[in-house]
Image (cartoon, rainbow, N blue to C red):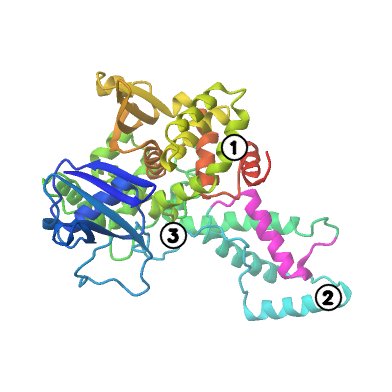
């Protein structure tokens, strides 16, 4: 079926369905993936009974067999729970991590500002008296061993809610916040007043991790000291908030393995029950992460064991489980937020970077939002002085898949016939992993989602490009940037070049 989709007056797309969806829910899932939509939305069709005026779609039987014009209306998520009794509309919610339990292994984004927790009653009383004395005459509180140990233990517990391996900057933030809330704890003779607290906190955090490691915490047992030759520390590198969760209560590894086998069997069916697959993918998340993080398998091996993970919907769902962030919505909103500023900076550099000038000339014929997004993403490696050929490779339809993907470890493949764009695909380890993608921005978003899902490091040749996408556009871990990316973000926020 050929579909003309009206999202708004400036965004009208044409998509093709190879087979007719069987249910309204599967049709909504198809539209969500193809259009990159997030949140709830309503689909309307041109009803011939009312002079082709738009009406809400309630059944697939209302659609013409060959081609149709549809309108997609985005709406806010209702406050009241949604029921199955809705008759004349249907909606699809964006991927969410709400299905996962609030366990200690489930991280939250690092808070800004960091809130110092409450301590036990006697410690809070000592701090209250100490702060009063400090305000009155500048007297500092002398803490005994037990009081200091409790303060550090409580802070370590609070830090662990956000990060098992906090950075140097995060230790600084916690120590500063402590003496800001309780100035009586400032250190005499220290310029900042909190250096010793910072180093004591680092030691306490190490002891706290060791205690949890002995207790069997998955995220920490993976880095056992006696686990063989010294290896790189396996920890969240992309600010994942749910990097390596424990198996939930009531489940065992054997039960999760049975569910994994059931997913593989379901994916082989001609008519896949996508709701069933989605539920099982959510519940088997701890098993999947354990395999990916600990064993570091090849992408082909992961695809054989977890075929559902390599679909648009499940890539977005896995990204949400890892980061508590919607992949496409966050990606495109950041891109649109800085769009005009990026284009200004590209124009300013185009006189010395010819590739930027060529990309900007593409907007002369097509100045749509979609085209601007693609130009910015393609121009980013040029602007950051990286190798753009590592991000996008152009291939012809006459080439075989092996020829197309050859030499591409991580990147996007643009397949064209003469000058017509036929398809975009995601390539990992010289294999086409995901195809049938409508445009370059969606392909980049899917690539980012897969790098998170498969725990793959950003390629060295494009480290700054992906850092900008993650930390600037998507604001995931944005509080810690390299000098080059920090400078770019400052320029984006400036009003003048």
Q: Is residue 256 visible?
A: no
Q: Residue at x 73, y 70 (%)?
A: 182
Residue 330 percent across, percent down from the top left: 45, 51
> In the image, is 346 to the left or to the right of 408?
right
Mark 3 and mark 2: span between their CA atoms?
39 Å
How far is mark 1 from mark 2, CA to CA? 51 Å
Q: Position of residue 202 (x, y in %)?
A: 64, 54
| Residue position marked by numbered label 3 in the rendering | 106
Q: Which residue is mark 2?
A: 135
Which label's residue is closer to the chain start, 1 or 3? 3
Residue 51 can be seen, yes or no: yes
Mark 3 or 2 closer to N-term? 3
Look at the numbered disc 2 and give the secondary structure of its residue. helix
Give 493 or 434, whichever is nearer the viewer: 493
> Tag on residue 344?
1
Q: Nearer the viewer, residue 260 or 58?
A: 58
Q: Quadrant of residue 351?
A: top right
| Residues rendered magenta in the picture | 165-188
Residue 20 in the image: above or below residue 175: above
């Amino acid at each position: 079926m050929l579909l003309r989709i009206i999202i708004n007056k400036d965004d009208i797309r044409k998509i093709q369905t190879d087979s007719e969806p069987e249910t309204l829910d599967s049709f909504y899932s198809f539209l969500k993936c193809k259009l990159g939509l997030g949140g709830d939305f309503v689909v309307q069709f041109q009803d011939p009974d009312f002079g082709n005026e738009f009406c809400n779609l309630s059944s697939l039987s209302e659609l013409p067999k060959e081609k149709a014009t549809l309108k997609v209306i985005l709406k806010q998520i209702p406050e009241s729970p949604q029921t199955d009794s809705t008759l004349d509309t249907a909606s699809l919610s964006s991927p969410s991590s709400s299905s996962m339990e609030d366990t200690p292994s489930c991280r939250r984004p690092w808070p800004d500002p960091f809130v110092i927790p409450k301590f036990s009653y006697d410690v809070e009383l000592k701090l209250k008296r100490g702060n009063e004395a400090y305000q009155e005459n500048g007297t500092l509180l002398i803490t005994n061993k037990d009081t200091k140990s409790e303060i550090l233990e409580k802070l370590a517990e609070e830090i662990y809610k956000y990060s098992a391996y906090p950075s140097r900057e995060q230790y600084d933030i916690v120590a500063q916040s402590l003496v800001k809330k309780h100035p009586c704890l400032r250190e005499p003779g220290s310029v900042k007043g909190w250096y010793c607290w910072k180093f004591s906190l680092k030691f306490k955090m190490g002891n706290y991790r060791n205690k949890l490691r002995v207790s069997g915490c998955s995220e920490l047992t993976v880095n056992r000291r006696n686990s063989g030759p010294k290896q790189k520390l396996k920890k969240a590198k992309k600010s994942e908030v749910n990097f390596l969760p424990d198996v939930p209560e009531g489940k065992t590894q054997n039960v999760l393995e049975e569910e994994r086998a059931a997913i593989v069997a379901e994916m082989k069916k001609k008519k896949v029950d996508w709701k069933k697959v989605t539920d099982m993918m959510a519940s088997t998340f701890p098993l999947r992460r354990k395999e990916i993080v600990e064993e570091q398998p090849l992408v082909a091996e992961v695809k054989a064991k977890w075929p559902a993970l390599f679909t648009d919907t499940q890539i977005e769902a896995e990204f949400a489980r890892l980061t508590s962030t919607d992949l496409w919505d966050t990606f495109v909103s950041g891109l649109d937020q800085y769009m005009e500023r990026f284009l200004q900076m590209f124009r300013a550099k185009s006189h010395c970077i010819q590739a930027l000038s060529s990309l900007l000339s593409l907007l002369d014929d097509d100045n749509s939002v979609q085209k601007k997004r693609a130009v910015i993403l393609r121009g980013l490696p040029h602007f950051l002085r990286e190798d753009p050929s590592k991000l996008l490779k152009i291939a012809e339809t006459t080439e075989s898949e092996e020829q197309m993907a050859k030499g591409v470890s991580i990147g996007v493949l643009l397949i064209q016939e003469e000058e017509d764009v036929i398809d975009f695909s995601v390539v990992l380890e010289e294999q086409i992993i995901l195809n049938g993608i409508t445009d370059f921005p969606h392909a980049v978003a899917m690539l980012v989602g897969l790098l998170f899902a498969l725990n793959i490091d950003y390629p060295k040749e494009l480290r700054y490009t992906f850092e900008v996408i993650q930390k600037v556009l998507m604001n995931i871990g944005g509080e810690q940037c390299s000098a080059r990316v920090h400078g770019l973000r400052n320029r984006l926020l400036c009003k003048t070049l």
